[in-house]
Every structure is written in C-alpha cells, then in structure tokens.
Image (cartoon, helix red, strand yellow):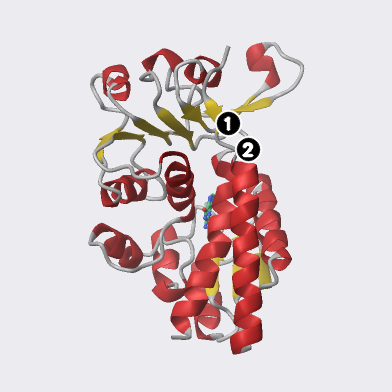
C-alpha cells in the first residue's frame, strides 16, 4: 500500500500557469507589453513535435504571443544561426527556445550560445549556467526550476537536508544540484560511476532522479519519509514486458518507493507538466528584465 503523498504536478503546474496568465495581463494593461516566445524545431522527431505543440498551445493560452518556426531536417547550421540572430534582434520576441536534440550535422552548443542570454528561456546558455553557478541572476533551466518549486511547496525550508541528484546532465542534474545547494541542502551528485548508489540514495532526505533509465532507482533504497522527485520519462514497449500496451515509467521504481517515501511525484503527471509551466514563467521573467 503506498503511504507517500502524491505530488500532483498537473494541478501545481495549472496554478503556476494561472500566475503567469495574471502577470501577462498586468504587463499588457499596465505597460502595453505582450510577452512573446519563439520556438524553433528542426526536423521531424515525433516526440519533439509533441513537446513543441504543447509549448506553443500553452504559450497562447496564457495570453502571450507564440511564434513557431518549423525548419526541415537538412537545414544547415548557418541557416539556423541566421534564424536565431533574427529572433535575437526582434523586439517582439522575449524568449527563444530551440528544441533539442538537433540533427547530428548541427553543433548544438554553437546554436545555444548564439541565443541572446537574456532571451535564453531554457537557461542553457553558458552565461546562464555560469550565473547559476556563481549566484547571479540568470535564466534557470525549466525542469530543475519545476522540481525546486515542487520541493519548496512540499517541504518549505530545506536547509540542512541531505539531497541526492542522480544524473549529471547539463540540462537537469547539474543545475538541479546548484539549486539545492542555493536552498542550503547538503548535495550529492551521483552518476553511472558512483560506487554504492543504493547506499548514497538511502542517506538522502531528498532524491531527484534524472538518469533517463527506467526504474533504475529501486524503491527499497529510499529512506523512510524522504521526498522523491522523478524526472524520468521512459517508454516501456509492449513486447519487452509481454503486455498489451506500451506505458510510461520514471527513473524510480514507483510502487515500492511510494511505500517508503513521505512524498513522491508520479510519472506521468509529476515533473513533466511543470517543465512547460516554468518555460512560460521564464518568458515572463525575461520580458520584465528586458523592459527594466
Ligand atoms: N528537449 C527536451 N527537453 C527540452 C527542453 O527543455 N528544452 C529544449 N530546448 N529542448 C528540449
């Protein structure tokens, strides 16, 4: 029987989006400014297309201007860089997101670093990662920001808590660890070469799993009463399990973890919806900073 409280990312993200919509109305009414978010997708990766469609739809729903650019898979790096520069120069565009992954022939880092850091609502630009690492005021990556908001809502003050981040990606693991450090947690970053992952996880009051491997974090590793945030979204194909339908699972073995955790995010319906809500929040933040 699960005893953990479910952290409802769907409901929480709806509240965040409501806040964004109010801020957008205030910007329009008081300052005559409508925030604008440009989303660029290169190629036809079906998962990316779904993400982008959701981003575009939710941007419009909060009252912002949404600019959507679809470019063919054989777009050259120069053409993509020219598009980024055009958006950098466009005053109606306050936020720019280039959907990743990009086709292999394009240098992702070069494209990300061509975005004006003030318009980098993904928070991936090297200037923004540097500002996060040094306590400056940059743009914070959306997924870790969403995790932090859920943790603050669940736990309040996190000072002195032991936190473990499983995964060390630039997009989630590293910025997540920085945010937990800023919240005065004692932070461990675990990864594929960590010697005793089970033992490290068992020490933690807060577990953020972002490795991208289905149910890798086992339920019986979780400390009694810990708060578990599962960033993973892994599709398990039907034949692999002998089941009729494919299904989505996180990086945490949910059923067993929910018997030990104090609170846990489900997959789907946990971190996922918070990422887009934070993208919209970042677009409002960027708009305010650009107009100050
Ligand atoms: N691809 C998967 N997640 C993301 C994201 O948060 N931002 C961008 N730009 N691409 C992604």
Q: Is residue 182 above or below residue 238?
A: below
Please indicate, yes or no, whether residue 251 appears anywhere in the rendered image.
Answer: no
Asked if the beta carbon under badge 2 is closer than 8 A to the nearest atom of ligand 1, the reply is: no
Q: Is residue 251 above or below residue 110?
A: above
Where, by quadrant of the figure, is residue 10 drawn?
A: top right
Residue 60 at x, y percent in the picture: 72, 67
Asked if the beta carbon under badge 1 is closer than 8 A to the nearest atom of ligand 1, the reply is: no
Q: Would you say 179 lies left or right of 281 here?
A: left
Q: Is residue 249 above or below residue 283?
A: above
Residue 15 at x, y percent in the picture: 62, 54
* Circles 2 and 1: CB atoms closer than 8 Å: yes
Which structural element holds mark 2?
Answer: loop
Q: Would you say 133 lies left or right of 224 here?
A: left
Which structural element holds mark 1?
Answer: loop
Q: Nearer the viewer, residue 153 or 242?
A: 153
Residue 50 at x, y percent in the picture: 69, 49
Q: Nearer the viewer, residue 56 or 207?
A: 207
Considering the image in quadrants, where does the N terminus appear? top right
Please give the name of the residue rendered at 37% of the width and 44% of the height, measured from the top-left corner: 169
Q: Which residue is mark 2?
A: 269
Please give the name of the residue rendered at 60% of the width and 77% of the height, measured from the top-left corner: 35
The numbered mark at residue 266 is 1
Residue 253 at x, y percent in the picture: 50, 20
């Amino acid at each position: 029987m699960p005893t953990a409280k479910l952290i409802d990312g769907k409901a929480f993200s709806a509240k965040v989006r409501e806040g964004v919509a109010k801020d957008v109305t205030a910007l329009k009414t008081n300052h005559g400014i409508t925030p604008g978010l440009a989303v660029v997708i290169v190629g036809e990766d079906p998962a990316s297309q779904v993400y982008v469609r959701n981003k575009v739809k939710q941007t419009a729903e909060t009252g912002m201007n949404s600019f959507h650019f679809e470019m063919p898979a054989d777009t050259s790096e120069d053409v993509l860089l020219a598009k980024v520069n055009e958006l950098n120069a466009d005053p109606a565009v306050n936020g720019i997101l280039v959907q990743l992954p990009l086709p292999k022939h394009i240098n992702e880092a070069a494209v990300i670093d061509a975005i004006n850091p003030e318009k980098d609502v993904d928070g991936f630009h090297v200037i923004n990662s540097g500002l996060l690492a040094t306590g400056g005021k940059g743009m914070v990556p959306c997924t870790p920001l969403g995790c932090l908001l859920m943790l603050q809502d669940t736990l309040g003050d996190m000072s002195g808590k032991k936190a473990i981040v499983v995964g060390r990606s630039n997009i989630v693991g590293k910025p997540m660890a920085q945010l937990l450090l800023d919240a005065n947690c004692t932070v461990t970053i675990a990864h594929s070469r960590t010697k005793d992952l089970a033992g490290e996880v068992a020490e933690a009051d807060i577990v953020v799993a972002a490795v991208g491997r289905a149910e890798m974090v086992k339920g019986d590793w979780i400390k009694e009463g810990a708060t578990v945030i599962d960033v993973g979204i892994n599709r398990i194909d039907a034949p692999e399990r002998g089941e009729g339908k494919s299904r989505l699972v996180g990086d945490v073995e949910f059923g067993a973890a929910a018997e030990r955790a104090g609170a846990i995010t489900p997959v789907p319906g946990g971190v996922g919806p918070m990422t887009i809500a934070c993208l919209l929040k970042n677009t409002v933040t960027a708009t305010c900073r650009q107009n100050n």
